[in-house]
């Protein structure tokens, strides 16, 4: 749950950050998900669910996903034991009717160990078209290998996915404005002839005081010697 | 104490600022050419004229690299060179040397220059077309005029010819007509109106200009037209058979063509010798008579023969046969000239040849007089290789490497090696030692600092050079005919499969290229120290190469296998025995046109390799209007020494060091912003887009460097019309996710991104970061400018964390306050006045010293040097005063001894008192 919160935070932060990289024309997209669960037939994809994002700028999404069947869970466990890839095919549909197909993979084992909690990162280009979809899971805390014993007790069949939209950001331009302002301020101050120095007395004149103090100490020490 | 802290802090930061600003300083005058050398080139030959009878004998030439120049016929050195504009503006269409005009009755006897108004004339470009007259003695421009054609597209195919002080501009309109305009060559005034000649038979594939004749090949006949003749009568000349190869013109003879190695004339006033058959012909003069010389390569012997043009009788004086090294490639005769010998009555002739390996070869008096390796004007890949160890060090190395057995065997081995060493020393002293090997004789032995290396250069023509990086000597040359770069504008590759570390195994390099004949892959493996083919040499693969990667070293012979993805997405490994190492590798491909990336996982199961597609990314936008213009990955041999950056508050900001991160830059025209440039940082193992950023109103040329946790790229800003550099740094944050092993599949997905843009007051042509053995030395970015200079830019100046307002935090961190324009002080130019014309690329390699990085800059010229970004902290200065320090040491030691003695005597005396 703690991680969920942190993701929410990231979403909020990314929303905040994308304040200056908003799309000029907001639009919606629809993502259809298919996954390949079989180790023997890597080209066989079955339907996993559907995500609709009504507003790319708002970044909120509706996720509808089918639970896994028993046989699907079993074949995923087989895949995980072989350290195979869980491959996800996403078909993105745009308002203009066009569609694009994306592929992403993660280790079947980490999906299983994360109890089917995953995050879908949808990356957008500056015009609002999807560049890539990536699925990732939180790293499993202790277990890193999927042996038969490790996977046996996992019975979760429902996917629980977070969708995070990442906008392209606007690149910086050379900041000549503030530099010229700073330069002007310094010039004006120089012209007025009063470079305001608000440092303390010691801070200003320590380079004169230190030698004097040293001299005093040395002479004092020699005087003491002489007095003896 | 508080009041003292702030000024002290200020002082320290000021001092550190000063130190930072003075990290690089220029060379001293006596260090010029001490650590560096430059070789100057002109490019592969386009037109050439040998002229031995001028008061200053010379070879005038123009090249495919838009260079004109003059060479010394005795040595081949450049007398002068002018590097003209880049293509298409600088493309040299015509080079006319006065005295070599077609119509002058006797080329050799014609007086030079003056009465024609020029020594040498060039025509370049098409829109505008520039006509220039040159002074051939010193290479200065004397006059210039230009024309701007009305139809620029059609003018691309325009051809020019010169006849009787008139320059003719011939613009073909394919399948319709030819437009001919004539100009007074020196002034640019037209002599009349443009004449349009109807010619529906012309097409771009089979037409050419031969002197004043426009000739097209149509099946079994040649259709031609004399453009200077009064009547525009079309002449048809039938051939005996349809030519198998392209037809060529014969410069110097109007209306004469080379068709399938034979001469054919379409000009009824010009008879030729139809019985000759040769690979290359040239027209010249000998004894004031016109001759045709021809050259053929038979069994590595170059045979040059000549016949008089008028009666086809042979000229025995011009016959020549000379051994021709294989690495020159196939020769083409370009020009020749003869000069009377001073003492006897014979003649001395110089033949100039260009070859398929882009060499210029001069043959005189039955031997190769000089050669110029002009393929070096197009270097596409370089590698620095360690030289082999000297024998004694080699055996020592062997001993160290030997599997540690028990003490007794180790002791025995040590005794035997030492006995052998004593024996060899004894033999060496009495002069009976083994003769030094070829590499040792050539001085190719590793030095103690690893600064002396073999520089292997791969050129576009397929010629490979082994060059000493200190002396610049060419130790070996190899030529691979019939190879080409790959699709997707990907060049051939030079790969180090085994480095010199594995004594006594020899180092091994490989060239991966595409066969020019069938488009399949070609692999050529060779020893980079001797230049000899090894492991079977040339290997023709029976598949096309789409992507390649290097595998880790094998256990038995330390060879890094090459993993190849072929056109049908099958994977192969070369050599075969390294195949099991390919298991678990990830590959990606990028299509530049559609901007689509695909990732694959390579699996080795049951003795077979397979590639499973695991991700894809589309950077093309919806209609794939975006095209990838640059892909930048990190140098695989890079070490990152410091894992983080200490901030002002003494906390550590950890770097995001992802070795699988690759930067992709795409560009597309945009309706609102004119041109948009996008940068994507993509993890090519997991396929996730780590970061993306967009620039508006910005376009190529783009140059990018990607290293450690940062990248810097330069581009042209269309809005303010200047070159800018944007830098990016990636940080994980104040905690590190996994500090021992990086896994892209379980990585922190969102690094912090610091970014900043700077103005650079020059045009950037190339960028590269310095690299050192362990990565302790500061990183500098080497920036090649359009004027041919290479500037060393410290990363501190490009740092995106330079604070805009001068806060104490920034100062504590050691960052310089932000100034939008980057300084380019002249002492930071590492090549001082040794400019590299048409700088295209800079390559860097670590040396054996941590402080020093080896640099080679390539373009038309090659410049090799070394840089020390943090100064040579691990090396004593070369003017270090050993005598003074030994005198001081001796005096101090003896002084202390004497004083001790005196002190003890004094103590003794005091005790007696």
Image: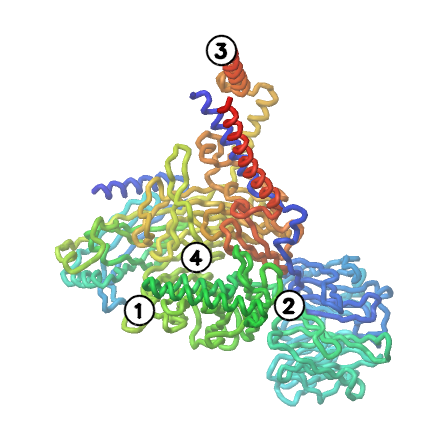
Camera-nearest residue between B540 and B496:
B496
Q: Are marks 3 and 4 on the same chain?
A: no
The answer to whether B481 appears left or right of B233 in the picture is left
Marks 1 and 3 in Cβ contact (< 8 Å): no
Dot 4 or dot 2, earlier in sequence: 2
The numbered mark 3 sits on a residue in which chain?
A
Image coords of residue B11 (percent x, y): 51, 28
Please name which of the two marks, 2 or 3, marks the residue nearer to the observer.
3
Q: Position of residue B607 (x, y in %)?
A: 30, 73
Taking the image as drawn, is residue A211 in sight? yes
Vertical comparison of B761 with A131: above or below: above
Write down the residue under mark 4: B636
User: Residues under labels 2 and 1: Cα distance?
Assistant: 45 Å
Helix, strand or loop at label 2? It is: strand
Residue B343 spot, x, y in % from top left: 86, 76
Callouts 2 and 3 on one subunit: no
Host chain of mark 4: B
* Gap in angstroms between the C-alphas marked 3 and 4: 74 Å
Dot 3 corresponds to which residue? A228
Q: Secondary structure at mark 1?
A: strand
The N terminus of chain A appears in which quarter of the rendering? top left
Q: Which residue is mark 2?
A: B373
Residue B291, horizontal then vertical, whole percent: 78, 81
Report the residue marked by disc 1.
B604
Estimate the spatial distance between the alpha carbons at disc 2 and disc 3, rounded to whole Å. Answer: 89 Å
Residue at horizontal 50%, vertical 71%? B526
User: Same chain, marks 1 and 4?
Assistant: yes
């Amino acid at each position: 749950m703690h991680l969920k919160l942190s993701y929410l935070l990231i979403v909020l932060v990314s929303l905040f950050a994308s304040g200056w990289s908003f799309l000029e024309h907001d639009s919606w997209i629809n993502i259809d998900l298919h996954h390949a669960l079989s180790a023997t037939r890597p080209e066989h994809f079955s339907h996993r669910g559907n995500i609709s994002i009504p507003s790319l700028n708002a970044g909120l999404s509706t996720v509808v996903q089918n639970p896994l069947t028993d046989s699907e869970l079993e074949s995923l466990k087989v895949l995980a034991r072989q350290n195979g890839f869980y491959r996800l095919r996403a078909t993105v549909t745009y308002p203009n009717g066009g569609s694009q197909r994306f592929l992403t993979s993660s280790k079947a084992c980490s999906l299983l160990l994360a109890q089917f909690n995953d995050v879908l990162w949808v990356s957008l280009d500056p015009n609002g078209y999807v560049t890539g979809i990536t699925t990732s899971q939180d790293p499993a805390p202790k277990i890193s290998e999927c042996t038969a014993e490790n996977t046996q007790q996992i019975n979760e069949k429902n996917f629980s996915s977070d969708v995070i939209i990442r906008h392209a950001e606007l690149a910086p331009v050379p900041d000549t404005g503030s530099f010229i302002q700073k330069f002007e301020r310094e010039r004006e101050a120089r012209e007025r002839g009063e470079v305001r120095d608000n440092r303390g007395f010691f801070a200003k004149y320590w380079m004169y005081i230190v030698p004097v103090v040293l001299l005093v100490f040395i002479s004092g020490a020699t005087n003491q010697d002489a007095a003896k | 104490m508080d009041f003292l802290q702030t000024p002290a802090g200020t002082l320290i930061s000021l001092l550190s600022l000063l130190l930072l600003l003075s990290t690089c300083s220029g060379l001293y005058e006596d260090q010029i050419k001490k650590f560096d050398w430059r070789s100057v080139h002109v490019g592969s030959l386009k037109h050439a004229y040998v002229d031995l009878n001028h008061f200053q004998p010379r070879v005038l030439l123009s090249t495919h690299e838009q260079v004109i120049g003059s060479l010394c016929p005795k040595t081949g050195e450049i007398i002068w060179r002018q590097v003209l504009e880049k293509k298409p503006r600088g493309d040299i269409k015509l080079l006319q040397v006065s005295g070599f005009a077609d119509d002058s009755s006797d080329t050799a006897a014609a007086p030079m220059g003056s009465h024609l108004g020029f020594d040498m004339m060039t025509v370049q470009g098409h829109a505008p077309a520039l006509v220039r007259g040159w002074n051939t003695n010193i290479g200065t421009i004397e006059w210039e005029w230009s024309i701007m054609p009305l139809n620029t597209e059609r003018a691309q195919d325009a051809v020019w010819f010169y006849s009787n002080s008139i320059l003719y501009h011939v613009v073909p309109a394919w399948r319709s007509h030819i437009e001919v305009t004539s100009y007074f060559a020196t002034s640019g005034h037209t002599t009349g109106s443009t004449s349009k000649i109807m010619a529906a038979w012309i097409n771009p594939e089979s037409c050419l200009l031969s002197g004043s004749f426009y000739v097209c090949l149509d099946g079994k006949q040649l259709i031609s037209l004399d453009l200077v003749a009064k009547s525009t009568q079309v002449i048809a000349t039938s051939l005996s058979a349809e030519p198998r190869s392209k037809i060529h013109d014969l410069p110097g003879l109007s209306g004469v063509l080379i068709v399938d190695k034979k001469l054919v004339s379409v000009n009824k006033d010009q008879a030729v010798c139809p019985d000759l058959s040769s690979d290359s012909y040239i027209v010249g003069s000998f004894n004031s008579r016109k001759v045709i010389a021809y050259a053929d390569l038979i069994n590595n012997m170059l045979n040059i023969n000549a016949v008089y043009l008028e009666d086809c009788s042979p000229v025995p004086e011009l016959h020549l046969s000379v051994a021709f090294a294989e690495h020159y490639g196939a020769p083409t005769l370009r020009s020749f000239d003869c000069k009377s010998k001073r003492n006897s009555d014979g003649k001395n002739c110089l033949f100039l040849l260009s070859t398929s390996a882009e060499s210029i070869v001069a043959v005189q008096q039955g031997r190769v007089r000089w050669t110029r390796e002009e393929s070096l004007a197009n270097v596409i890949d370089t590698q620095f290789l360690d030289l082999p160890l000297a024998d004694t060090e080699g055996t020592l190395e062997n001993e160290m490497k030997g599997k540690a057995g028990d003490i007794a065997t180790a002791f025995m081995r040590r005794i035997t090696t030492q006995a052998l060493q004593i024996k060899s020393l004894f033999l060496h002293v009495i002069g009976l030692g083994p003769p030094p090997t070829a590499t040792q004789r050539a001085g190719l032995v590793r030095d103690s600092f690893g600064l002396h290396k073999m520089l292997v250069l791969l050129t576009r023509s397929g010629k490979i050079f082994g060059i000493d990086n200190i002396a610049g000597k060419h130790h070996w040359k190899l030529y691979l005919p019939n190879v080409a770069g790959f699709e997707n504008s990907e060049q051939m590759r030079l790969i180090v499969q085994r480095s010199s570390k594995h004594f006594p195994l020899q180092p091994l390099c490989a060239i991966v290229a595409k066969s020019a004949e069938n488009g399949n892959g070609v692999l050529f493996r060779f020893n980079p120290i001797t230049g000899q083919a090894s492991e079977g040499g040339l290997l023709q693969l029976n598949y096309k190469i789409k992507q390649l990667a290097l595998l880790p070293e094998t256990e038995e012979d330390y060879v890094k296998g090459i993993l190849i993805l072929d056109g049908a997405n099958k994977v192969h490994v070369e050599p075969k025995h390294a195949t099991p190492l390919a298991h678990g590798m990830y590959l990606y491909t990028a299509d530049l046109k559609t901007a689509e990336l695909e990732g694959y996982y390579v699996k080795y199961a049951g003795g077979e390799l397979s590639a499973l597609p695991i991700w894809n990314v589309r950077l093309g936008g919806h209609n794939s209007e975006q095209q990838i213009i640059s892909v930048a990955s990190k140098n695989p041999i890079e070490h990152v020494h410091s894992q983080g950056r200490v901030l002002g508050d003494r906390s550590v900001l950890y770097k995001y060091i992802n070795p699988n991160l690759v930067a992709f830059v795409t560009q597309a025209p945009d309706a609102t912003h004119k041109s948009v440039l996008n940068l994507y940082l993509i993890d090519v193992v997991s396929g996730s887009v780590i970061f993306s950023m967009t620039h508006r109103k910005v376009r190529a040329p783009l140059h990018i460097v990607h290293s450690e946790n940062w990248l810097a790229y330069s581009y042209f800003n269309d809005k303010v019309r200047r070159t800018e550099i944007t830098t990016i740094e990636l940080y994980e944050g104040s905690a590190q996710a996994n500090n021992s092993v990086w896994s892209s599949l379980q990585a922190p997905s969102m690094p912090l991104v610091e970014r900043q843009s700077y103005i650079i007051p020059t045009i950037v042509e190339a960028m590269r970061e310095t690299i050192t053995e362990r990565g302790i030395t500061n990183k500098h970015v080497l920036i090649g400018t359009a004027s041919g200079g290479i500037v060393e830019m410290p990363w501190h100046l490009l740092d995106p964390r330079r604070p805009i307002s001068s806060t104490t935090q920034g100062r504590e961190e050691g960052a310089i306050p932000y100034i939008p324009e980057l300084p380019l002080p002249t002492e930071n130019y590492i090549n001082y006045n040794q400019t590299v014309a048409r700088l295209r690329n800079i390559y860097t390699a670590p040396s054996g010293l941590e402080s020093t990085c080896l640099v080679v800059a390539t373009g038309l010229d090659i410049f090799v040097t070394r840089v020390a970004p943090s100064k040579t902290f691990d090396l004593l200065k070369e003017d270090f005063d050993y005598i003074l320090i030994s005198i001081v040491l001796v005096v101090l030691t003896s002084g202390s001894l004497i004083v001790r003695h005196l002190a003890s005597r004094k103590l003794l005396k005091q005790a007696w008192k």
